């Protein structure tokens, strides 16, 4: 992924390169046709000079792009344009050599209108297609970058909203975010869900985790901020935050990465972090692997933090008691593999709790 691209200084040079490369391509065709049927005319040198000028101009435009983007795609375009420039110089040089050669063999070859001349046309065509392909890739990168910026802005706003409406503390969000990352890394390290837990995927889980309780924006203040335990009716309303969060995030029109993007994972976490492995959770009563992996990881992180954190209606549990409780719910509330990862990471969980403890 390429970050911090100022594409406003890139789009115009790309458009110029498109025009210049198209002109070079067309003039190269003209050059080959011209020398095939009128090889003694000096006008071909004018065409060659124009081709070289346009090719060099395209290289200069590419250099201005390099100042704003450093990527393999940009380097590929630059090398292709350098090759285009090299061919623009080499082709008339070959023609000049053939014209001025005193060798009878070269003179004979030059004078014949045979297929070897048209080999260059294949080279020009392949090079032009490669250049256009690189430019299309960069334009696509521009659109992807715009979407990423919009997604980042939207996520920042939603994160701020989630923290403002959190009936717990902002540190709850930070802690659970870090718990999720530790669990994901440990699961992969233990050989579980390796296809789903690449470095990029784990980073996406880390970014999505703060939005797991975004649905609390739809819970009335008298319930969300109640100083004490909720009654049955209030608890049913509070439970609706999972479905609300999923609906809020699903209404977003911005998504980068398809099913593996940040918003998609946030939707899974918001809607599924209260599901249970045995199917007794909410809002849908999903069971086992029907629950998205991201939500299964979030479920354990959320419960652990709820257990060890102090609330107005309870004291925080000791770390050891919280571990025992979670282990006892393996295969009931939690994915057994996630519980195994938690056991291996429990000391890091304790460190995170202490580092980001509520003030």
Image (spheres, helix red, strand yellow):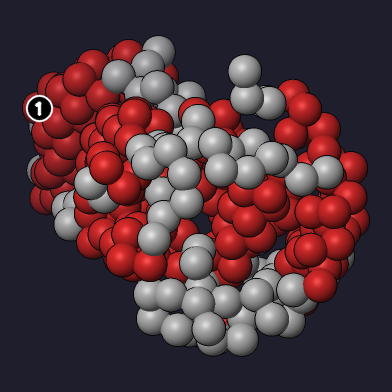
Residue name at image x 74 percent, y 73 percent: 329
Nearest the viewer among 231 and 199 is 231
**Dot 1: element:** helix
Residue corresponding to mark 1? 43
Along the line of sight, the residue nearer the viewer: 78 or 141:
141
* Side of 178 relative to 188 (left or right): left
| Residue in the picture at 79% in, 63% down | 325
Confirm whether residue 234 shows in the render: yes
In this image, 283 relative to 301: left or right? left
Q: Is residue 189 above or below residue 57?
A: below
Percent x, y of residue 56: 30, 19
Is disc 1 surrounded by few (<14), some (14 to 19) or many (20+) residues within 10 Å? few
Q: Nearer the viewer, residue 254 or 186?
A: 186
For the C terminus, which image quadrant?
top right
Q: Which residue is drawn at 38% across and 75% down?
A: 283
319 relative to 342, above or below: above
Residue 145 spot, x, y in % from top left: 31, 36
Task: Decide if residue 309 is in sight here.
Answer: no
In the rendering, at what x and y percent does residue 57 appear? 24, 17
Measured along the vertical axis of the image, is residue 295 above or below residue 83? below
Residue 57 vs 205, above or below: the answer is above
Whether residue 32 sits left or right of residue 275 in the image: it is left
Q: Residue at x 18, y 57 (%)?
A: 251
């Amino acid at each position: 992924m390429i970050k911090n691209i100022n594409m406003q200084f890139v789009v115009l040079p790309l458009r110029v390169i498109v025009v210049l490369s198209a002109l070079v391509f067309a003039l190269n065709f003209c050059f080959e046709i011209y020398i095939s049927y009128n090889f003694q005319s000096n006008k071909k040198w004018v065409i060659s000079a124009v081709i070289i000028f346009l090719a060099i101009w395209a290289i200069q435009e590419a250099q201005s792009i390099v100042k704003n983007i450093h990527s393999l795609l940009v380097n590929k375009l630059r090398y292709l344009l350098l090759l285009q420039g090299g061919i623009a110089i080499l082709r008339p040089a070959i023609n000049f050599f053939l014209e001025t050669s005193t060798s009878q063999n070269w003179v004979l070859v030059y004078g014949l209108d045979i297929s070897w001349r048209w080999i260059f046309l294949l080279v020009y065509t392949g090079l032009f297609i490669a250049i256009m392909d690189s430019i299309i890739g960069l334009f696509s990168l521009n659109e992807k970058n715009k979407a990423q910026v919009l997604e980042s802005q939207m996520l920042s706003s939603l994160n701020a909203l989630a923290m403002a409406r959190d009936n717990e503390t902002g540190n709850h969000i930070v802690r659970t975010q870090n718990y999720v990352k530790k669990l994901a890394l440990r699961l992969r390290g233990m050989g579980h869900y390796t296809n789903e837990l690449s470095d990029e995927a784990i980073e996406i889980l880390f970014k999505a985790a703060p939005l797991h309780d975004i649905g609390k924006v739809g819970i009335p203040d008298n319930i969300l901020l109640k100083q004490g335990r909720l009654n049955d009716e209030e608890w049913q309303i509070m439970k609706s935050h999972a479905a609300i969060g999923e609906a809020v995030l699903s209404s977003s029109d911005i998504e980068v990465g398809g099913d593996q993007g940040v918003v998609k994972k946030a939707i899974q976490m918001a809607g599924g972090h209260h599901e249970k492995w045995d199917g007794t959770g909410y809002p849908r009563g999903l069971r086992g692997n029907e629950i998205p992996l991201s939500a299964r990881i979030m479920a354990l992180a959320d419960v652990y933090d709820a257990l060890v954190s102090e609330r107005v209606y309870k004291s925080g549990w000791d770390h050891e008691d919280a571990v025992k409780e979670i282990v006892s719910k393996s295969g009931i509330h939690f994915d057994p593999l996630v519980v195994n990862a938690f056991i291996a990471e429990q000391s890091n969980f304790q460190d995170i709790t202490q580092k980001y403890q509520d003030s």
